[in-house]
Structures are given as structure tokens and as C-alpha cells.
Amino acid sequence: MRSSSEVLEGNKVKLTVEVDEQELSEAVDDTLRRLQREVTVPGFRPGKVPRRLLEHRLGGKAIREEVLRHAVPDYYAQAVEEAALDIIAAPEIDITSGEDDGPLAFDAIVEVRPKVSIPGYDGLQVTVASPQATDEEVEAQVDRLREQFAELTDVERPVRNGDVVTLDVTGLKGDEVVEELAATDYVYEVGTERLVPGADAKLHGAKPGDIVEVETEDAPGGATRVRLLVKVVREKVLPEANDEWASDASEFDTVAELRDDVRKRLSAYRRLQANIELREKAVEGLASLVTEDMPDTLVEEEFGRLQHGLAHRLSDNNVTLEQYLAMRAMSGDDLMAELHAQAESQVRADLALRALAEAEELEVSDDELAQEIARAAQENGRTPREMARQIAEGPGLERLRSELRNSKAVAWLVEHVDVVDEQGNPMDRALLLGHESSSEEASEDSGDAAANKGAASAADEAVEAEAEAEAEDKDEEGEE
């Protein structure tokens, strides 16, 4: 077989394939052997039909069509592999000669994954919120803890946010009382916005004995007015933040130790947020460098995956599409537009990461691929051999390799972008790791070493399993 390729417009490539009669005769022989097993002829056992009789009964044209039906896809796949094409859509095949007899020749026009440009990727700057907890944030957390031990004291002053009031609530529709919205001695914290809309604003400034009314169209029983009688106003008196309180309220002996622990926990959470933000903004920044239009084929494929994923999540949570749309206050068209925009964004990011991996010569070795298979197998309670077979039958090893390569590109990007805080000041990357980074990294390194050691044999087994899977697939095709 001989093949050549020609680049066309629109991310398409034209493959020209030629197969001489001698090579094609092997495909003819394979087809006839398969048909001998499949075709039933009276007087002959399955698989024992003479070839000449079979050729006579089916006719040369039908046999030729069957040969081409099976052989052309195989020759096309070989041509794709020889040209090292990353195809993203089914080909348009045109047989130019040999449809009836003689040497075979055909053209195949196929859409390939485009390569995009990412100019200036090595100078990207990412703004990330500081991972360090501020004194104000620490005190706010301490105050929340103090509130749990607050005492309520009656006051005669006007109501303000944070006060706890006792109310008699009456819902009215015209002059009739709505029973669904009636309560006596209802205890409510002003400022939480948990009553009918507008109630908190009306309560501000009220005193014990005052009556306020709120007009509303969204209340139980269809009430149009809600009358609130303020009976008692109490304010929260928080305990003093001292060592005695800290000892009673926490496992720490002093308030300083409590604040240190709050700061440590807040900073750990902020570091997690900052690292997620860094990763997301770095990829967004890289994708923004891409100016090429995204191929409809890739966008529609990703759009379909997003739709499928959303349907599964809704089903898992027993939520209908109508309920989901109502919760988000959007129409079906709005949702489809959102998913389509998300699909285009993800395709753009994927192509940008592929371009970065190529520019920085980031590759995934067979050992790394096998280790990933071993890791996935362990997570899913499967053997590496079983997982390799599942991947080979599903998205394929090359897709997995591409995903791992993109992960390497993200890691490279995160490591090389300039990171600044919200004021534009360069950020010390050590802050993103935390003060415990050295011991944590040492522990992770030792854990990785043990995992890699255990994965070594699994890696070999996974690669071997993939080779066996491919061999068996070829055997099955031959039997067909």
C-alpha cells in the first residue's frame, strides 16, 4: 500500500491511497474465508462451502463490494497512522479506481485537530488572592465563636441588625387573616433576611410595642400584607475574648493559641483556594492567547459530553431538567447557550495546552502511562490488566496519553506564570505552599516513591495487557 497526504483548508487533509492487485488479493482471500464460514449453502456444513461455489453463487461484484467494505477502512487507518494525523471526524472516502476490479485507489478527506498559536505564553501574569489570613478575618471567626456563647439582654432602644426580637406575626389578605402566616412569640434575628422580603428593613428602628406592616406578593397563603408586632427586643452580649473564655469554648488554654489555630485553619483554606484560582486563571490566560476559530466538530462533541454529564448529575440527584431550570431562573435555550459557550471555552483551553506541551516538548512515557493505568485500576478496584483493556475499548490509550500530556502542560504553566496579589505585588510562591511545605513535600515524595515502586510491575503488566487486547482485537477481526 502507498499513501500520500495533502493539507487542505479548514483543518482538513486529503489522503491518497493506492493498493496493488497482489496486496488486494490478500484481502480478497480473507473475505472469502470469512464468507465460507458465514454463508449457508444446502448440502454443505458451515465453513466447508467450496470457494468456487461461493464465488459462483455470490457473484464477483458482490464479493468485490464485501472486500472493499472491510478493506478500505483498514487501508485508511494505515494511511492515517503513516501520516501521523490526529483526526477528529469521520472521513469522506471516494474510491477513484478498482471498484470493480484491478488495483484499488481512493481519496479520503478527513478533518484533523488544528494546531493553534499561543504567542507570549512565557510571559503570562496571574492575579491571585493572598493566601494569608488577615487579622480582620481571624477576629471575625473568633467573633462567630463568641456569638455561640452570647447572652441575650432586653433593651428598650430601636431595633438594629443582630438583635433578637420576639414578634407576633399576622398575614392578611384584605381584612382576612391568613392562617398559614400567623405566629405568636416568634423569635427572629434581624438581619438574617429569613422573613418575607422587606421585613428586616421595616423592623430597623422599631421599638417594643411598635407594629410594622410589609406589603408582599410572595408569602404563604397568598397574603398581601404581613403585620409584625414587636413585643421584645434583645441584644447579644458576647463574652470577652480572654483566656478564661477560650479555655471554656475551645481546646486551647489561651485566646492567643485560639487565634493562632484560627489563623492556621483559615490560611490553609485560603491556600487551597489560591492554588485552585492559580490553576484556573493560568489556563484561562493561556487560552486567551488563542485567536483561531474553534472547529465546530470539536465544539459540538464537547457540547454533547457536557449535556450528557449534566443529565447524569441531575438524574443522580433526582432533579428534573424543569426543576433545574427553575432553580437557576433560566430557559432551556439559555442553558443550551451556556453549555455551548462552555464547550467552546474548554476546546480552546485544550488546544492551547496541546500547543504548550508541543512548544515545551512535554511528553508522556510508556511508564507514566502505565502508572496512570495502575493508579486508575487501584481506585476502581480493578487489576491493571482489566483497566488497560477497558481503556483500550473506550477512549483509548492515545486519548489518555493526551490527557496526561495536558496535565503536564498545566503543571508547567502554573510553575512558570508570574503570580501577583490583588494589589499587583509579586507573590512569594512559598505562601502558596504554606510554612509546612518542606515536611509535607518530604512526606509526599516518600509516598510517591513507594507508589512508583509498587506501580513498576503494574506498569509492565498494563502495557502487556494492552498489547494482548490489541492482538485479540485483530484476531476477532480476522475471524469475522
Image (cartoon, rainbow, N blue to C red):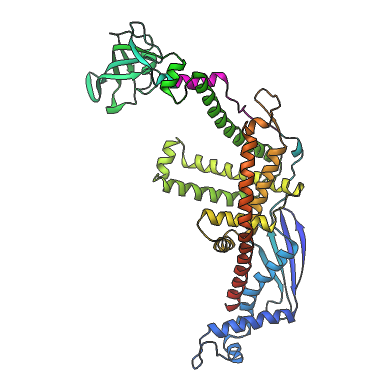
Q: Position of residue 148 (x, y in %)?
A: 39, 21
Which image quadrant: the C terminus?
bottom right
Q: Residue sitting at 60 percent across and 84 percent down?
A: 33
Instruction: From this view, report whether residue 236 is shown above or below residue 2.
Output: above
Q: Position of residue 123 (x, y in %)?
A: 76, 35
Number of labelled discs? 0
Instruction: From this view, report whether residue 282 is shown above or below residue 131.
Output: below
Q: Residue sitting at 66 percent across and 81 percent down?
A: 28
In the image, 374 versus 27, the foreground residue is 374
Q: Position of residue 199 (x, y in %)?
A: 36, 18
State left or right for residue 127 relative to residue 236. right
Visible residue check, residue 278: no
State left or right for residue 286 relative to residue 207. right
Visible residue check, residue 4: yes
Instruction: From this view, report whether residue 313 is shown above or below residue 394.
Output: above
Tell me where residue 466 sits by quadrant. bottom right
Residue 187, magenta (yes or no): no
Tell me where residue 473 sits by quadrant. bottom right
Q: Residue sitting at 61 percent across and 54 percent down?
A: 372
In the image, 54 versus 388, the foreground residue is 388
State left or right for residue 216 relative to residue 37. left
Q: Position of residue 352 (x, y in %)?
A: 69, 45
Instruction: From this view, report whether residue 224 is shown above or below residue 342.
Output: above
- Residue lying farthest top? 156
Residue 131, magenta (yes or no): yes
In the image, 92 versus 166, the foreground residue is 166
Point out the stretch of residues depicted in magenta: 125-144
- Residue lying farthest front? 253
